[in-house]
Image: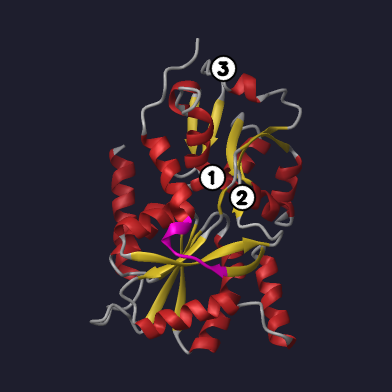
Amino acid sequence: MIARTLALTLLAATLLAGCGKTPEANGTPAELQFSVQTVEDVSLMKSYWQPVVDDMQKATGLKVKLFFSPNYSLLVQAMGSNQTQLAWFSALPAVEATQRSNATVFARTILDNGRGTYSSVILTRKGSGLTLDKLMKCDKTLDFGIGDAQSTTGTLAPIAFLFKPAGITPQDCFKTVRSANHQANLLAVANGLVDASTNNTTGLAFYRDGTPEAKAAVAKTEVIWTSPDVPESAMVYRKDLDPEVQTKIRDFFLNYGKAQGPQGDHERTVLAGLKYSRFEPADDSYLAPVVELKKVADTAPAAKAP
C-alpha cells in the first residue's frame, strides 16, 4: 500500500508539473490542455481524438494539446489545479470535476446508434458455465475484475445496481478482486486470468472493430449481466476560462459533424471512429442520475438475504 501511494504521488507530481504552461491571471493559458481518459491503448486513443483537436485548432484559432492518463482521479485533480482546462470524462469523473474542480458540463456525447446512454456489463469466458447466479453466490472461489474506483460502468454501476441491492461487496464476495481498465479486464477474462469482470457496451463496440487482439478477446467472452442505462460521456471545461474561449469551444463541439461538403464528411468520419454521431448541449443537470447512483453506492449495503 505504501509503495502504491508513493507511486501515485509521484505520478500526480509529474502530471501537475508537466501538463501545460503557467495559467494567465484569468485562468486561461496560452495553450489549453485537453485531458482524455485512456480507457484503452494510448496510441489508439490519440488516433481517435487528435483529429478532433486538429479540427478544433483550425476552427477556433486556439492552441490545444491532448493529455492522456489512465487514472481518473489524477485527471480530476489536474483540472482542479488548472493544469488541464478541457476534458472528455465518463459521467462519474465528470461529477467529481463539477463538484470539486471548478468545472462545468457544456456538452454530452451521442452514440452512433443515436442513444445518449450506455450500460455496464459483466463478462465471463464463453463455455465457462459461469452464470450470474453462480457469480452472486459469493463463496470466494472466483477471481473478479473491476474498474477504476472512479469508473462509471467499471465500478459505480455494478455496485449500485447489482452488488449493493444484494447486500454484498465485491471484496467480500470473491477470492480476488483486480482493478484495471476496461481493455485489460476484457483480456483478463478472455485469457482466463479472472473468471468475470466489468465492462460496458460502448467499449465492447470499440473492441469488436479494434485490434486483432481485442477482436479475438471479444469473441471469447459473453455478457452475463447488463445494467440499466447510465448517461454517456460528458464534455467539461473550467468555469474560469475566458468566456470567449468557452464560446469557441462549445460552438465547435455542438456544430462538429453537421456541416455539408468535404469538411462535414471528414468530421463525420472522425466521429464514426469515436463511435459517436454528434455532441449535444448539456449542463451539470445531465449528471443528476449519476449523482444519485453515487449516493446509493456510498451507502452501507443492506443485509444479505439468507
Three-letter amino acid code of the residue under disc 1: Thr
10 Å neighbourhood of mark 1: few (<14), some, or many (≥20)? Answer: many
Three-letter amino acid code of the residue under disc 2: Tyr
Q: Earlier in the sequence, mark 1 or mark 3?
A: 3
The residue to which callout 2 is attached is 118
Q: Quadrant where the N terminus lies? A: top left
Measure the alpha-carbon separation of dots 2 and 1: 9 Å
Q: Is residue 173 above or below residue 98?
A: above
Q: Position of residue 47 (x, y in %)?
A: 61, 69
Query: Could you tell me which residue is drawn at 30 percent across and 55 percent down?
Result: 10
The residue to which callout 1 is attached is 153
46 left or right of 297 in image: right
Question: Which of the 4 image quarters holds residue 283?
Answer: bottom left
Q: Secondary structure at mark 1?
A: helix
What range is drawn magenta here? 280-286
Q: Is residue 31 magenta?
A: no
Q: Which mark is residue 137?
A: 3
10 Å neighbourhood of mark 3: few (<14), some, or many (≥20)? Answer: few
Foreground residue among 21 and 250: 250
Foreground residue among 68 and 300: 300
Measure the alpha-carbon separation of dots 3 and 2: 27 Å
